[in-house]
Image (cartoon, rainbow, N blue to C red):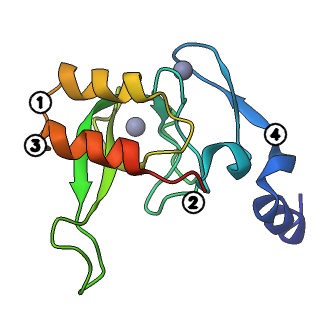
């Protein structure tokens, strides 16, 4: 594939199709119409991800490719200087089952809410439950 083709595929992620979840085997559509995010990298059903990115989300340069387990939720501080004081985006934290790398991922619009709450309940998290619920209920698809 030439560089130009590659860039076109990125601009139209729907054309790139879907990937199969390494953990539960579900087929996951990459189209942002469903997920509301670019660079969807985790399964909306079991929330497992895959170690694909090296430095920046979406670079897909990692050689690891191992499954990544959802290990908790965290609030990413908002970059807006004058935004709401309690601001911040709820992020899903994944840990690579192979190399232990920790990655923060944006939660997608079609992620399973109960699954996210399970992740919250199952693992240590420094986010208060009320904040988690507010973020999950208030999230806007796309
Ligand atoms: Zn899955
Ligand atoms: Zn890894």
Spatial CA span between label 3 and label 2: 28 Å
Disc 4 to disc 3, how far (Cα)?
A: 36 Å
Badge 2 or badge 1: first in the primary sequence: 2
Q: Residue at x 53, y 22 (%)?
A: 45
10 Å crowding of disc 2: few (<14), some (14-19), many (20+): few
Q: Is residue 37 above or below residue 30?
A: below
Q: Which element carries disc 4, helix, strand or loop?
A: loop
Q: Earlier in the sequence, mark 2 or mark 4?
A: 4
Question: Decide: marks 4, 1 in contact (CB < 8 A)?
Answer: no
In the image, farthest residue toward the top: 24
- Residue matched to label 4: 17
* Residue topped by disc 1: 124
The answer as to whether callout 2 falls within 8 Å of ligand 2 is no
What percent of the width, then of the height, locates residue 102? 29, 44
Task: Identify the element where label 3 is drawn.
Answer: loop
The yes-or-no answer for disc 4 within 8 Å of ligand 1 is: no
Q: Nearer the viewer, mark 4 or mark 3?
A: 3
Residue appearing at x 87%, y 48% in the figure: 15
Crowding near pointer 1: few (<14 within 10 Å), some, many (20+)?
few
């Amino acid at each position: 594939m030439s560089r130009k083709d590659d860039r076109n595929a990125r601009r139209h992620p729907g054309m790139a199709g879907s990937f199969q979840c390494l953990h539960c085997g579900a087929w996951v559509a990459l189209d942002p119409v469903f997920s509301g995010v670019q660079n969807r990298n985790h399964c909306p059903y079991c929330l497992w991800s895959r170690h694909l990115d090296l430095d920046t989300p979406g670079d897909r340069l990692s050689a690891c490719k191992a499954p990544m387990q959802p290990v908790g939720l965290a609030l990413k501080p908002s970059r807006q200087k004058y935004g709401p004081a309690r601001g911040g985006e709820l992020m899903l934290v994944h840990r690579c089952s192979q190399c232990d790398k920790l990655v923060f991922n944006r939660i997608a619009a079609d992620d399973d809410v109960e699954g996210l709450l399970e992740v919250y309940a199952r693992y240590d998290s420094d986010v208060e439950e009320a904040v988690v619920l507010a973020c999950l209920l208030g999230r806007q698809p796309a």
